[in-house]
Amino acid sequence: MVVFVGLIMVVIGLIHFYLWKRLVKDPLPPGRARRIGAVIAVALAVLAPATLIGVRSGALPWLAWPGYLWIALMFYLLVTLAVLEIPRLALVLLWRSRSRTGKGSASGTAPGDPVEPAAGNAEPEAGQVLTAEKPADDGIERRVLLARGAAIFAGLTAAGITGYGVRTALGGPQIARVQVPLAKLPRTLDGTRLAVVSDIHLGPLTGMNHARRIVDVINSVQADIVCVVGDLVDGSVAELGRFAAPLAGIQSRQGAYFVTGNHEYYSGFQEWVDEVARLNIRPLRNERLELGGLDLAGVNDLGGADAGDPPDFAKALGDRDTARPVVLMAHQPVAVHDAAPYGVDLQVSGHTHGGQMAPFNLLVGLEQPVTSGLGTVDGVPVYVTNGAGFWGPPVRVGAPPQVSVVELRSK
């Protein structure tokens, strides 16, 4: 753990060094402005890890807004500047090539070569030697202009994307609809609707209206079953219990059900399991229920193993009537590898946030078999919702918050 934290600190330091070079050192001349920029860069380099550590531990909750917004802005500054490195390098190489071939000087002579005076001009004074104009100063000026242009463009782009992302993350969740055919589903259950919601992440940046907006959307779809697939909270019941209170208003024909996510194990999972039950949401703790002609199963999150509360797929899925269709609630999509041998007909998951901040979604795909939407893994359909909240920066880009409606259809 210490090594991991140390590695994160080194990475954050290197990122800020790069941002300082491209946004401060390259575009600004030596002097007061550059010194101020260096101080700001150091302060922001300290702010990022202080936020990640202080907010999560509860020691510095007031850092949440400025710290997480800077982390988002830092990310998009890094991405934008990295993309600009390619045209920047091409321009620098072009200028160097033109300078070497003499195309940068008006006379075509090499810098420093003697120049004969033009006809009709006065002769040089005794001892005076005329030389071709050196393009060095011109080259420096062009590089500074390029650096300033890139810095301005990156700043405006990152600020615009971050602002859009904040508006998206703090808005109400969208409704995503998908139909999933199940071969075993009785015709009497054709059209059964599951409202799948995940990653609500009640925390220091949300408040009571966050849960209330999500509940309003859930209730608007008139679902038969509501599946809350983990990562409900980022804090204790004492801190966030009042923010979770609106969840008691969830309405469905056959009940609302909950499985733990990895963040419940950072927040006191047992007290949240009890609190969720008090809010009339049934926790499924490695267990299975019969809901008419459909089985609904739920397993603890894979992260529960470190807290002595691991998933038990055999307990939840074993010794059942395999002629009945079973839908599994599992927080992480990757759990499907353990669930597939039990003949699961559909797994519903969250955890990925759909990547939350593009292009981060490209990295999520390295860990999870499905990042967003419907996919098939080991022969099992897996539906992954984007989640209804956010973790860390209150920013969503390319992955809007969702409440998903999964409609089960008979083949």
Image (cartoon, rainbow, N blue to C red):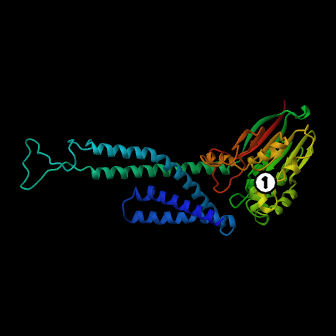
Judge whether residue 375 can be spotted in this image: yes
Q: Position of residue 259 (x, y in %)?
A: 82, 52
Q: 387 left or right of 96?
A: right
Q: Position of residue 206 (x, y in %)?
A: 70, 57
Reading the image, the residue beneath label 1 is 301
Q: Position of residue 77 (x, y in %)?
A: 52, 52
Q: 8 left or right of 128?
A: right
Q: Residues within 10 Å of mark 1 (few under 14, many from 20)?
A: many
Q: Quadrant of the N terminus?
A: bottom right
Q: Decide which of 54, 327 is in the foreground and name it.
A: 327
Instruction: Give the number of marks.
Output: 1
Q: Please report the residue visible at 14 percent of the width from the left and 50 percent of the height from the top.
A: 130
Q: Is residue 145 above or below residue 175?
A: below
Judge whether residue 243 can be spotted in this image: no
Query: Dot 1 lies on which element?
Result: loop
Q: Decide which of 301, 396 is in the foreground and name it.
A: 301
Q: Amino acid at mark 1?
A: Asp
Q: Please report the residue visible at 64 percent of the width from the left and 54 percent of the height from the top.
A: 394
Q: Quadrant of the C terminus?
A: top right
Name of the residue lying farthest toward the front: 341
Q: Position of residue 342 (x, y in %)?
A: 85, 43
